[in-house]
Image: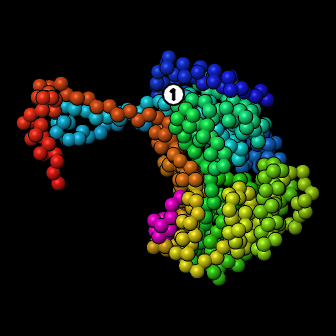
Amino acid sequence: MTTMTAQSMRALLDKQRAAYLRDGPPSAEVRIDRIDRCIGLLVDHQDEIADALNKDFGSRSPQMSKFTDVSGSIGPLKHAKESVRKWMKVEKRPTTPAILGWLGAKAEVHYQPLGVIGVIAPWNFPVNLTFAPLAGVLSAGNRCMIKPSEFTPATSELMARMFKKAFDEAEIAVCLGGPEVGEAFSRLPFDHLLFTGATSIAHHVMRAAAENLTPLTLELGGKSPVIVGQGANMDLTATRVMQGKTLNAGQICLAPDYVFVAEGQRDEFVSKATAAVTKMYPTLKDNPDYTSVINQRHYDRLKGYIDEAKSKGAKVIEVNPAKENLTQQPHHKIAPTIILDPTDDMKVMQDEIFGPVLPVKTYKNLDEVIGYINAKARPLGLYYFGEDAGEKDRVLTRTTSGGVTINDTIMHIAMEELPFGGVGPSGMGAYHGLDGFRQFSHRKAVYQQPTSKMVDGQLANMRAPYGEGIQKFLAQQIKR
């Protein structure tokens, strides 16, 4: 792996910016061609991508990788390709006061490329969280520099080769390296920087970007709660919660982080959740469908959460259908683990879990749940299961989160027509679809003043020396 230096990355940025200034905003045809090249890379390298991800994780299903990282990237790119001509159109706005429009004035919003966008991608879905943002970046007409994660070296090096094959480095370039490269990358004077990753790292990225007042989109995470309404279908609820919790072994920024279930329904939820895991993963140790934790550090962190919860009196249920000995394995697999009645002094209720560990709490009434969630940092996602319209509306209006999925988990991220982003500690800014195009565009206000004598006569009243004309105008404007 060739590690980039701060100087070589700055040279790349200067090269991309010079190319943008030389060529100007690209046409729709150029934008579509760049998007098509990205789609082609994903289609042509799908097997290599799955192999690289399996190598980096130790065990990761090729079908899951093609679903989340390949197909999950092609969808946003195709949506942008189909929509870009519409998104690029000048947006006409009414003039204020309206009389100016009658006299020939025009108010418009022009969507202009920002220039060079930096993308720092994480390790959990390294291909998807590189290529999916490119739907917005490229449709908006920008060039891009990408810093992939050093935790997935095989995938990062593969992506570097892929982009080099299809793009000139003045269009898209990949910068490989570890934390020191990431820090230098964050300090570059991009026209916009997208960071996807941990909130703890976002503090450093934001401080570095502040040196150049670089605008940021931060896609972070947090503790995304699940609220199980008293009338929820427990079979469906448990199945969908555990699907969201075990996909990629829970290493998802939107994975359900803890569950609130009504008193008296906890044991039913646990029983149904255990049955759901057993059906999806009858074995774990050598099952290629069950993903390994990414590395030893994260394995130790998750084991630490479980051990601490046990030591503080929580009931811990390991869902290990075949009763396999997971201490003897070549990877870092952890069985789906349910922690009952955790207390807030446990790390599992303080940190974002990012693994197959699920705390379950009980509640007496909905206000108790809403109060608990609102006392914590605002999460990236929130999930409600139930059919009670009043209960659902109360959850939606009385809690704040980046997004919500009702009667499932995670799925709002797959909706290209919806903005995806966090709020507060779970992120800032949003992208996907039209919102991605706008996030990576400069919305330039353009006003055209009429040149007629009638308009100029009115404008003359607003120029010095001030007289009776402006007094009449002010009398009309300054009133209730």
Q: Residue at x 53, y 53 (%)?
A: 423
What span is in magenta? 392-401
Give residue 384's position: percent from left, percent from top.
56, 67
The quarter in which the C terminus is drawn is bottom left
- Residue sitting nearer the eye, 277 or 263: 263
Q: Residue at x 78, y 36 (%)?
A: 154
Give residue 286's position: percent from left, percent from top.
86, 55
In the displayed image of the protein, which residue is found farthest to the top? Answer: 22
In the displayed image of the protein, which residue is found farthest to the bottom? Answer: 264
In the displayed image of the protein, which residue is found farthest to the left? Answer: 468
- The vertical placement of 214 against 296, above or below, is above
- Residue sitting nearer the eye, 110 or 467: 467
Does residue 111 appear in this view?
A: yes
Q: Residue at x 88, y 60 (%)?
A: 326
The image quadrant of residue 209 is top right
**Residue 1 on the magenta span:** no
Few, some or many C-alpha atoms within 10 Å of disc 1 (few <14, some 14-19, many ≥20)? many
Way the structure is coloured: rainbow
